[in-house]
């Protein structure tokens, strides 16, 4: 059926795959109308998609270094864009983002602006230059550009702290979704999630992760867009929701004032009866509800963090050329944009369908007993994602008496809007794809840094290829297992730890990476000072604020990267200027990085 | 000035333009959230502040990156630094 090299046939291969997936959805829909149980549909969706990723992972197995570390540097521009988008959009983006917008409105949307704006920095400041460098990992760039093992080790430390914070959240998300879809306890589901993540990456490294991520992107974007369009059309809100929901946004504002949003406050005693993790609507949907600084500081942290997170940067090491690395960033952002611009629309549709008394699904203003008798209310109440209580005893449900979990916006809205269960199964498969693809990228980023930079470059530079690849795989397994064990403890929420990961990365890596390309005078001593002092001061600020510290400049535990990166910048510049300029060979290396043509600075195999 | 220095000067110029546009749409306009909300300019009927956060700025970033990539390719071409196929 398919002749010639795999790379030449990508559009065909993934075209068939997409068609197959759509056919599978239709098949499930037919099975549902023939009486297949909801539980079985959920199991089929998750098992089928994860099985395909595992197959791709197996077919992409490799024994070559550059295939394992950088997918042989032959991933075409557009496909690398898709893979990066899947790498980037985590369980948090998929499951929690629309919920965050639903509850927090404008102030939360700083994350949308930050998580997209960061790609402008990636494209203009870093990606093409790091691609020209020809490194395998981000610490590989730091170690070679600045010279010396100390700088390399520091980069490995920052990378590990940031990525590990992030990966536990992702393994947690795979566990949550697997436990709901397969109906098994969370503690077991986490390890099933881990097993699926490892199958995708262990045999083929970056090459396997690349081709599974493309497959995962296709599943997650279909799973996100179909419900948004379907709900919008079903509600009669508009054929193309992104361009047509202005009336709905205005209607929500009207209902907010009608229902007295913000005027009726719940007492602390009443709120204590609400299950943990659920929240009511307390903020306006569309109007500006955050100070400029609160919005901008959060956006800045997410942007600088985007440009410093190693699992994103290393995706651009896999393109065939510098030119394609640059364009690939544009494609990545385009594919991310498709989902991010849909999240606010889903939040709007979800909120209106619950609030508007003119709609059949609206529950605010109905009698409490009527709401409690709804099928979907009972389901999601049982899943601990929904709660109503008649605080004022008037028998009807008021806006301040309805509580929901953030995940429910994505997970429950299809059911509330009356879509068939097959859509809920699809959404579970999408969430699983999103969480798995990010976890894969992160686990690989950490394991590669440890195996290449720590083991090969520092501990045993004479190691042979076979031995290096075994070490890489063993580390991958250990990192994944450690991540899963911590995820199983369920220490913090998904979204909080994701934001911290950005702040950690920004504190330690942003300026050492950027100045490595853009400032020739930057030297090893400066870079070490920048990485370490940045990471330490950022972490110290976080601990201080977490333990009741007042903070300053309005910087919170979500934006501590501003402190870290400022300290990093100042210490890097001061220490660099106080110590000797980099030698002529290093300066020539920087010159070489700045022009796209010619050979990479590091050899093909190193 | 050497060919390489000229190339870098142009590249840096493009970077500054790109970052200036980026700054306006990621940071600059959000100093004026309240003013944007009150504005009578409402793209597709949405309040301007709402529109920029959910589509406007995001879309501009996508276009900006492709524009930047095109301009940079032109600069590389001008100085003969374009990569050969199979490099």
Image: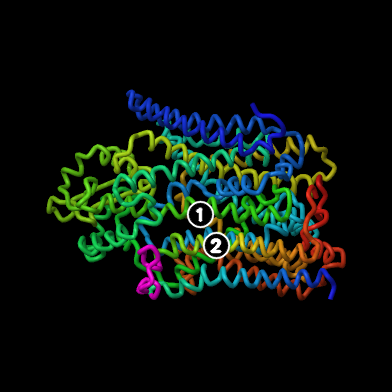
For residue A337, which numbered disc appears in the image?
A: 1
Return the chain for callout 1: A
Visible in this render: residue A20? yes
- Residue depicted at x 28% and y 50%: A353
What crowding class fits label 1: few (fewer than 14 Cα within 10 Å), some (14-19), or many (20 or more)? Answer: many
Instruction: Determine if residue A195 is in view.
Output: no
Magenta extent: B35-49
Q: Residue drawn at (69%, 45%), measured in percent from left and top? A: A448
Q: Are marks 2 and 1 in contact (CB under 8 Å)?
A: yes
Residue A10, given in percent of the width and then of the height, sits at 64, 38
Residue B56 image position (x, y, % from top left): 47, 63
For mark 2, does the 10 Å Cα neighbourhood hold few (<14), some (14 to 19), or many (20 or more) residues? many
User: A358 above or below B58?
Assistant: above
Q: Residue A503: x, y in percent?
A: 56, 60
Residue identifier under label 2: B61
Q: Secondary structure at mark 1?
A: helix
């Amino acid at each position: 059926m398919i002749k010639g090299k795999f790379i030449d046939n990508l559009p065909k291969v993934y075209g068939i795959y997409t068609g197959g997936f759509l056919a599978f959805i239709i098949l499930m829909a037919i099975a549902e109308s023939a009486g297949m149980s909801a539980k079985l549909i959920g199991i089929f969706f998750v098992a089928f998609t994860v099985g395909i990723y595992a197959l791709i992972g197996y077919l992409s197995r490799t024994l070559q270094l550059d295939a394992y570390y950088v997918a042989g540097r032959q991933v075409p521009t557009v496909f690398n864009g898709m893979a990066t988008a899947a790498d980037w959009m985590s369980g948090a983006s998929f499951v929690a983002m629309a919920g965050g917008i639903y509850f927090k409105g404008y102030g939360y949307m700083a994350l949308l602006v930050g998580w997209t704006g960061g790609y402008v920095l990636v494209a203009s400041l870093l990606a093409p230059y790091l691609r020209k460098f020809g490194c395998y990992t981000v610490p590989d760039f730091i170690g070679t550009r600045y010279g010396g093992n100390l700088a390399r080790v520091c980069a490995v430390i920052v990378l590990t702290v940031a990525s590990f914070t992030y990966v536990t959240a992702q393994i947690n998300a795979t566990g949550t979704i697997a436990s709901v879809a397969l109906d098994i306890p969370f503690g077991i589901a986490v390890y099933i999630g881990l097993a699926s993540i490892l199958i995708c990456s262990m045999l083929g490294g970056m090459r396997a992760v690349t081709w599974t991520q493309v497959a995962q992107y296709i599943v997650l974007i279909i799973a996100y867009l179909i419900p948004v369009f379907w709900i919008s059309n079903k509600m009669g809100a508009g054929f193309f929701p992104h361009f047509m929901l202005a009336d709905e946004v205005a209607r929500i504002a009207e209902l907010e004032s009608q229902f007295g949003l913000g005027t009726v406050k719940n007492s602390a005693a009443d709120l204590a009866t609400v299950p943990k993790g659920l929240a009511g609507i307390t903020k306006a949907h569309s109007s500006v509800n955050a100070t400029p600084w609160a919005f901008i500081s959060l956006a800045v942290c997410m942007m600088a963090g985007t440009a410093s997170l190693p699992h994103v940067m290393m995706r651009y090491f896999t393109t065939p050329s510098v030119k394609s690395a640059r364009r690939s960033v544009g494609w990545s952002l385009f594919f991310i944009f498709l989902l991010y611009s849909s999240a606010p629309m889903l939040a709007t549709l979800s909120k209106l369908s619950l609030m508007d008394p003119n709609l059949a699904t609206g529950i605010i203003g109905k009698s409490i007993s009527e709401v409690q008798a709804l099928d979907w209310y009972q389901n999601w109440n049982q899943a601990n994602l929904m709660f109503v209580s008649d605080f004022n005893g008037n028998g009807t449900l008021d806006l301040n008496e309805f509580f929901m979990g953030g995940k429910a916006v994505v997970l429950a809205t299809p059911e509330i809007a009356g879509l068939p269960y097959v859509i809920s199964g699809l959404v579970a498969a999408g969430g699983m794809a999103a969480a798995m693809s990010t976890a894969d990228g992160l686990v690989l980023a950490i394991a590669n840094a440890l195996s290449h930079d720590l083991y090969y470059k520092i501990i045993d530079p004479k190691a042979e290829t076979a031995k290096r690849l075994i070490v890489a795989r063993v580390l991958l397994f250990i990192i994944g297992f450690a991540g899963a064990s911590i995820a199983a403890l369920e220490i913090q929420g998904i979204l909080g730890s994701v934001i911290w990961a950005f702040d950690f990365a920004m504190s330690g890596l942003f300026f050492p990476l950027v100045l490595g390309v853009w400032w020739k005078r930057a030297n090893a001593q400066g870079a070490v000072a920048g990485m370490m002092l940045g990471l330490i001061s950022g972490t110290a600020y976080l601990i201080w604020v977490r333990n009741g510290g007042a903070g300053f400049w309005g910087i919170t535990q979500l934006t501590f990267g501003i402190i870290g990166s400022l300290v990093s910048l100042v210490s890097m510049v001061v220490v660099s200027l106080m110590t000797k300029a980099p030698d002529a060979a290093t300066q020539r290396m920087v010159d070489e990085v700045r022009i796209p043509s010619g050979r990479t600075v590091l050899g093909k195999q190193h | 000035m050497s060919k390489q220095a000229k190339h870098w000067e142009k590249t840096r110029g493009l970077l500054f333009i790109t970052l200036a546009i980026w700054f306006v749409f990621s940071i600059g306009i959000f100093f004026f959230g309240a003013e944007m909300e009150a504005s009578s300019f409402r793209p597709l009927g949405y309040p301007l502040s709402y529109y920029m956060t959910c589509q406007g700025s995001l879309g501009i970033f996508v276009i900006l990156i492709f524009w930047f990539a095109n301009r940079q390719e032109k600069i590389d071409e001008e100085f003969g630094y374009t990569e050969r196929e199979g490099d």
